[in-house]
Each structure stands twice: as structure tokens, then as C-alpha cells.
Image: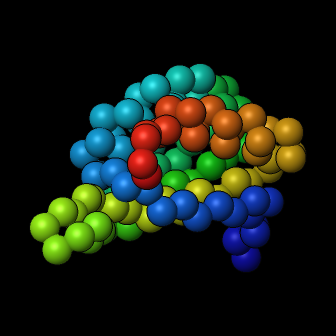
Amino acid sequence: MAAEPDFVVEQERGISLAEFFRVLPRVVIGYDHHVEDRRITLWPEGDRSHRIEIELSEERKRELSAIFTLPAITIHLAFFGYTQGGFDAFMEHFNLRYLRGGG
């Protein structure tokens, strides 16, 4: 039976998959990681007792008006073996790297 995550977050972001993966190297500093298609698994360097699983939706278009659209994805993050403090610290780190004006 698979362990249940300690924390789960789902975010809607106005970002393309290409942009997400362009920023990813700044997010994984200090983490061992594995990328498979739209799934990323992170472990603190040298510590496999904690992990973060990130799953990305397919890219879609968000219509802002009849003539203006933006790319959008859903980001699902699941944290295993994390305390509240570790979760909060990672989410602050993650959100700062993906912060964009307007979405």
C-alpha cells in the first residue's frame, strides 16, 4: 500500500510547459531529481526519506478575451516525509521561482 502524502498542493499557473521546464533548474538546486515526461520527483540531496512528486497537466490555453490567450497548466505537488516547516520552506522557494506578474 502506497503511503499517503503529508501535504498536497494544486496550483493553476499562467505558464507554458516549456517555461516551467526552463525555470526548473533553479528550483531543484539542492535536490536530486528525476524527470519523466510531465512528472518530476525531487529528493533532498543524499536523503531519500523525503520526496516531492510534481505532476503537470497538459498545456491548455486560457482565454482572456476574444483575441488574447495565454498558456496555462495545473501543477500538482505531493510531499512525503515532510514537516510543516519543510513544506512551507519548499513552497516559498518554489513560488518565488515561478512568480510572474499577472498569473
Residue at 70% in and 71% down = 2
The answer to which of 94 and 63 lies nearer the viewer is 63
Q: Residue furthest left?
A: 67
Can residue 60 be seen here? The reply is no
Quadrant in the rendering for residue 47: top right
Quadrant in the rendering for residue 80: bottom right
Give residue 35's position: percent from left, percent from top.
39, 46
Residue at 86% in and 45% down = 83
In the rendered image of this protein, does residue 78 appear above or below residue 94? Answer: below
Can residue 84 be seen here? The reply is yes
Residue at 74% in and 35% down = 89
The answer to which of 37 and 97 lies nearer the viewer is 97
In the rendered image of this protein, does residue 14 appear above or below residue 94? Answer: below
Give residue 57's position: percent from left, percent from top.
38, 67
In the image, is 40 to the left or to the right of 46? left
Q: Coloring scheme of the render?
A: rainbow
- In the picture, which quadrant includes the N terminus? bottom right
In the image, is 2 to the left or to the right of 35? right
The answer to which of 22 and 46 lies nearer the viewer is 22
Give residue 92's position: percent from left, percent from top.
67, 37
- Label count reads 0
The answer to which of 14 and 45 lies nearer the viewer is 14
In the rendered image of this protein, does residue 12 appear above or below residue 19? Answer: below
Quadrant in the rendering for residue 76: bottom right
Residue at 17% in and 74% down = 66
Give residue 82's position: percent from left, percent from top.
80, 47
In the image, is 102 to the left or to the right of 59? right
